Image: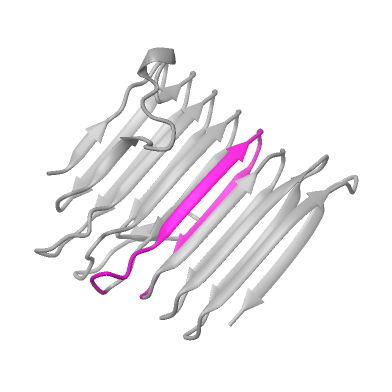
């Protein structure tokens, strides 16, 4: 019962999708609906999309990767049921129940997005809502270990470098909005056995960009 439901337009796009287990979904997002009528859910030229979803238990929560990408030369990789490093090395183990979800909407060019979500227990599910508008963003995000974890990230301007990791056996949440005339370099880590939350609304008006680093353990 895995499903892929998507359309694409443009040329020279590369799409790699792997789903292992059951009840996985990759395709257009319920938030916007199908983009088939206006060019495709993946529209533009020279985009690269790689999605891997894994559930290796008899009962799977059903991973969902929902996307809408319109633009050129975007590079998106995302792994559910895996842990991925900043260098793109993905690893898994023998206990992954699935149930994670991401809604992704990228407009613009030359973005790089690499992330993963995984846990070890049934019903411990992570979610990620990412909206990126603009170009030259480099985002690495990772959620791992047990208890529900949530990321809401919106980037509306160019030249950001974001590294966001949430781990530990507790429920963490992060709500991040980056905007302004210049980019913000954000490094956020929440890694604890007690629940952590962080919210940031950043409007950078500093020539040369801004920088924010937060660690909560």
Asked if the magenta segment contains residue 137, the reply would be yes
In this view, which residue lies farthest toward the left? 58
Q: Above or below — where is 203 with respect to 12? A: below
Q: Could you tell whether 1 is left or right of 198 in the image?
A: left
In this view, which residue lies farthest toward the bottom? 193
Asked if the magenta segment contains residue 12, the reply would be no
Q: Above or below — where is 58 with respect to 110? A: below
- Hey, which quadrant is residue 16 in on the image? top left
Q: Quadrant where the N terminus lies?
A: top left
The coloring applied to the image is one colour
- Hey, which quadrant is residue 137 in on the image? top right
Q: Is residue 199 visible?
A: yes
**Residue in the picture at 38% in, 60% down:** 117
**Residue in the picture at 36% in, 57% down:** 90
Q: Is residue 86 visible?
A: no
**Closer to us: 150 or 118:** 150
How far across and down, in percent of the image, does residue 112 sit? Answer: 55, 41
In this view, which residue lies farthest toward the right? 207
Q: How many marks?
A: 0
How far across and down, in percent of the image, does residue 59 sit? Answer: 12, 63
Q: Quadrant where the C terminus lies?
A: bottom right
Q: Could you tell whether 158 is left or right of 83 in the image?
A: right
How far across and down, in percent of the image, does residue 105 sit? Answer: 50, 37
How far across and down, in percent of the image, does residue 111 sit? Answer: 58, 37
**Closer to us: 211 or 2:** 2
- Hey, which quadrant is residue 127 in on the image? bottom left
Q: Could you tell whether 173 is left or right of 84 in the image?
A: right
In this picture, which residue range is highlighted in magenta? Answer: 121-146
**Residue in the picture at 16% in, 62% down:** 56
Q: Could you tell whether 1 is left or right of 82 in the image?
A: left
């Amino acid at each position: 019962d895995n499903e892929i439901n998507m359309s694409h337009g443009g040329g020279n796009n590369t799409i790699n999708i792997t789903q292992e287990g059951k009840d996985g979904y990759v395709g257009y997002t319920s938030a916007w609906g199908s983009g088939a009528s206006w060019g495709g859910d993946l529209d533009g030229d020279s985009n690269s999309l790689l999605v891997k979803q894994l559930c290796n238990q008899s009962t799977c929560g059903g991973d969902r990767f929902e996307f809408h990408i319109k633009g050129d030369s975007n590079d998106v990789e995302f792994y559910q049921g895996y842990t991925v490093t900043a260098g793109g090395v993905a690893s898994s183990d023998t206990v992954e129940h699935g149930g994670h979800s991401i809604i992704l909407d990228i407009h613009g060019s030359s973005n790089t997005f690499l992330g993963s979500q995984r846990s070890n227990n049934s019903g411990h599910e992570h979610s990620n809502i990412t909206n990126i508008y603009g170009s030259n963003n480099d985002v690495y995000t990772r959620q791992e270990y047990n208890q529900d974890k949530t990321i809401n990230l919106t980037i509306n301007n160019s030249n950001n470098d974001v590294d966001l990791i949430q781990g530990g056996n507790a429920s963490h949440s992060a709500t991040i909005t980056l905007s302004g005339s210049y980019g913000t370099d954000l490094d956020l880590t929440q890694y604890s056995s007690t629940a952590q939350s962080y919210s940031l609304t950043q409007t950078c008006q500093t020539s040369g960009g801004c920088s924010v680093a937060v660690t909560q353990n």
